[in-house]
Amino acid sequence: MYMFDHMRYCEENNKVTLFGQNFSKYLANVTTLQITTNLSNCLKNEDYESFKAIRSSKGMWTITPSGRFGNLMGQYATLFALARLNKKQAYIFPNMANSLSQVFKLTLPMLHQEAKTQIPWQNYHIADWMDEKYKNILGDYIKLTGYPSSWTFYHHIREEILREFSFHEYVTEKVNFYLTKITAQRQNVTFVGVHVRRGDYVHVMPKIWKGVLADRNYLEKAMAYFRNKYKEVIFIVTSNGLDWCHKNINTSNGDVFFLGDGNEAKPQTDFAILAHCNHTIMTIGTFGFWAAYLAGGDVIYLTNFTLPDSPFLKVFKYKAAFLPEWIGIAADLSPLLNQSLNV
């Protein structure tokens, strides 16, 4: 197996078989002519032309890493997709690579720190969701900025995004060990990952965004859905507010386990556990979104968690944030309404 920036190849019977979509550099002992010939046979005509355009294009694209783990995943996926649409080679900064590559087999090449400061970048701000104008961004050295957090950027190449976020084998082995210990003598277990976002949102949502967090009632409804649908369910809870979870999640059925450590500085283990489950209950936030996106299966999310006049809705669209097939349960906004009546 050979790696070419973000293209994988396998040499079999003296032929190069394509597994990915873009590459650079050279394959050992294989001439450039041979590679070009084999690629033209492996790729569809439009894909091959796009590949040639990307490799021959001037300049490079990148994105400014901002926020935490879920934000970085959204930025990576958006860069990957928009650079492809605009036929440009994408690179990522070291701090993004250092965070994500702890668990994922990333293929976008990393930009050296010195190059980062010497290249004449043109900043290009993007909204949180896809817009038609992003299909034709002019500029050779584009540095995307913003907090893109919508499937509308990359869902059309979902399989490629899932490959980009493939877990290292040692991560999967570690998670499987945890899950196997839990199952004990149970057969045909269905794992449901539960991510409860709290942390700074406990104050930010009600005081700044006119919104609420998931409450006990929401979690009970979401868990009831899975208990009714599947026979042998185990809920794996992770959160950056585990104390709240222990007090507010009913564990009397013996099917709830708290596996995560809630370490916001090192969230990779919590994330891997959630993403290896069969289904997902998320609340709000990009961390929960990406865990659900990678896990697949049924997804329940908290919806309508802000008041209609919330400033949050200027930078956030429910339809662009959650996939259409996911199941939304409306939040209880009464705490906010009662608060406004008492003012």
Image: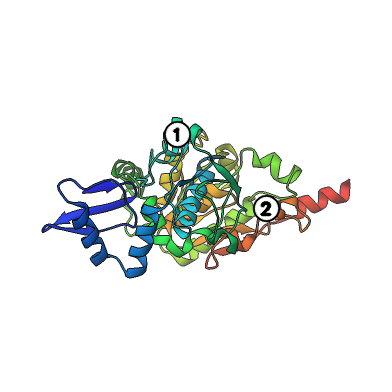
Q: How is the image coloured?
A: rainbow
Pointer 1: residues within 10 angstroms few (<14), some, or many (20+)? few
Q: In the visual, does 210 lie left or right of 292?
A: right
Location of the C terminus (image quadrant)? top right
Marker disc for residue 196: none
Q: Residue at x 76, y 53 (%)?
A: 310
**Where in the figure is residue 24, as x and y percent of width and height?**
31, 48
- Residue type at mark 2? Val
Marked residue nearer the N-terminal end (2 or 1): 1
The residue indicated by pointer 1 is 115
Quadrant of residue 322 within the rendered picture: bottom right
Q: Residue at x 71, y 51 (%)?
A: 312
Label 1 sits on a secondary structure element that is helix
Q: In the visual, does 272 lie left or right of 342?
A: left
Question: Is disc 2 in contact with disc 1, using a CB cutoff of under 8 Å?
Answer: no
Q: Residue at x 58, y 37 (%)?
A: 243
Quadrant of residue 318 within the rendered picture: bottom right
The residue indicated by pointer 2 is 315
- Residue type at mark 1? Ala
Front residue of 250/150: it is 150
Q: In the visual, does 301 lie left or right of 119?
A: right
**Where in the figure is residue 265, as x and y percent of width and height?**
51, 32
Q: Is residue 252 visible?
A: no
Q: Marks 2 and 1, how far apart in space?
A: 32 Å
Closer to viewer: mark 2 or mark 1: 1
**Where in the figure is residue 20, as x and y percent of width and height?**
31, 57
Label 2 sits on a secondary structure element that is loop
